[in-house]
Image: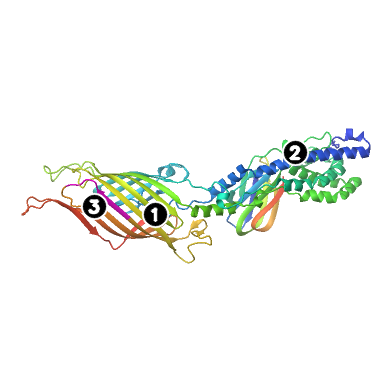
Amino acid sequence: MVFEVRWAGGGTATLEELLDNQRLVGAGVTESSPLEHPYRATAATTHVVRWVLSFPGRKLTNLAAKARKNGGPAKPLKSAGEATGRWAAEGDH
Amino acid sequence: MRVVPMIAAGAVGALALPAGARAQAEGRAASAMFERLKAGALADARSLFEPEQREKMLVEARSQTPLPDRVAALDPESAAATVDRATLGLKTDVKGAEAGIVFAPAILFGQGPESALAALNVVFAALQGEQTRVGVKYAWQSPLEPQSFTALGLKECPFDAAAFTGHVEGLRSHFVAVCEKVVASLPPVAGDADDEDVRHAVRVRQAAQAGCGVAGATFPEPGDAVLDPVLANIRKAVARAKESGDAAFLERIATTAASLARLEEYRFVSRWGCQTADLVAERVREWRWNSRRVTWGAAATTDFFPRKFGFNPAEGTSELPGGEVKVWELRAERAQRLRRTEWALGVGGGERRQAFDEKRYGYLAPSFYLAHIAFRLGRGTLLDAKRILREVDGKPVPHVSLGLAVDAELALSRPDTQDTSLNSLECKAFMDFKISDTLSFRLGVPVKGELAVRKADTSATPAVTELRKIQWSVPVFVVTVLKL
């Protein structure tokens, strides 16, 4: 699986936690947009992906998270117009 | 279009039972499956809070929190200060050199700063009188790092198993109701069997029914037998089934709307509710600033006379130098930094001679260094609210350190013509301007005493004997480039 999150507003953000079907698959990844995090997950019909992205003291806009499975097309998980300091959300693929 | 022949798994056996008994059996199966899913969720949630996970979080925070300068403003000429890559310049890091280079070969050849060899520096320098210096130095910094949340003044993030179990248990009746009344009798998925979307919908339906413990239904994938995706599959399967238009089915969905909403509201735990990576990183930064950081340094240097060939105008009275060793020295230093102040004590020992055809005499060379980060360059305050050197974009603000360095060389043995045991003494007051990572320079006022040699002259009347005495010099100021 590849988790990807994009935003406008520049700077870096930290993917503090990424869970796939209740399992921790990523933590502490700091990158600028687009942040991509590939990970291995147990095969499942549906992957419930939950994440916490942090960017203390800043406001980011046009946040959008996607996931790709087995090299397939990216599927949108969730998007948000803006978030301040932190964006915690979930989606499924 | 080929319709997928999908019949609710388990329906064959279940249809043999009266409706009431069948519903009871489905309810029991759903409750049993829920118990299994709850146990799995509890185990997964607990694992998020295990010490290994916390340690992993701490290590991640450490790796992302830059260390303070290896030694924030340590005298670049000392043995305990090493460079991260290389410095090159005139009258720079190499004491007494006209031009020199100091570099870290391990880093230049691709190793990371965490490598044990990263702090090994090699020195090459050209000295006055065509002499050459070659040396190595190594600095070892105490690996002082916070080992626990307690050391950082943070409480351990506890996992409240009872609260989590209660959170999940609150779903049971809603889960059973949805499974019994809706999922067990999901209509078949209609559509083209070659359509990937339809095939996926079939798998989702199957996974939802397996998650509800419907007899005969099995999980299509090993990762489906988990509460989070089971709830997602139920939600997706029900949403798709609504499109079937089956009036009886839609009525059942309506009667379980509240339970379906409760299942949608469920959220698995997050370990970040207690402490965030940012908070941990901030505490690591504070801890490092307020902890004494000790650096041990060692250096070995040798100065050589030049090799000269060919015509010798003084043939018969003196030889030409042939690359003889002028000075060799071994040096050890201990440097310590705490908040804005650092100091270093060192001692070196070796042998030196003034001319290549003389005997070398032993010496001892103590040194002392003290520096204090005094004020900020530009507007704003030097320290932040936590009394830590302020950073902008992760870099310390431009600042000035005031300091004093004293280097002495005491003769262990000396020629008869030297009337003092002091070979040299240098006291230097300085201001280090730290503009950025890559630009810093020093304004210094050294008071320097060095041996000056009066050569013997037997042809003079009366004859002049050789004499070695200290000669003092005070330049108005000296600018030294520390980093470019």
Observer-nearest of B120 and B383: B383
- Is residue B196 at all visible to an observer of this figure? no
Circle 3 residue: B422
Mark 2 or 1, nearer chain start: 2
The quarter of the rendered structure image containing the C terminus of chain B is bottom left
Disc 3 residue type (three-letter): Leu
Alpha carbons under labels 2 and 3: distance apart: 82 Å
Q: Residue at x 55, y 53 (%)?
A: B283
Q: Which one is nearer the viewer's eye here, B143 or B19?
A: B143
Question: Disc 2 designates what residue?
Answer: B225
Looking at the image, residue B149 sits to the left or right of residue B421; the answer is: right
Q: Does the stretch in magenta take in B114?
A: no
Have a look at marks 2 and 3 and say if they share a chain.
Answer: yes
Of callouts 1 and 3, the N-terminal one:
1
The N terminus of chain B: image quadrant: top right
- The single residue placed furthest to the right in the displayed view is B18
Residue B224: x, y in percent? 74, 39
Report the front residue among B140 and A50: B140
Please name whichever residue, B103 or B335, is drawn nearer the observer in this view of the structure.
Answer: B335
- Residue B471 appears in which quarter of the rendering? bottom left
In which chain is the residue bearing label 1? B
Q: CA distance from mark 2 to mark 1?
A: 61 Å
Query: In the structure shown, which secondary structural element does the residue marked by tag 1 occupy?
Result: strand
Q: Is residue B411 magenta?
A: yes
Residue at 86% in and 34% down: B10
Q: Chain of mark 3?
A: B
- The mark nearer the N terminus, 2 or 3, is 2
Magenta segment: B406-415
The residue labelled by disc 1 is: B343
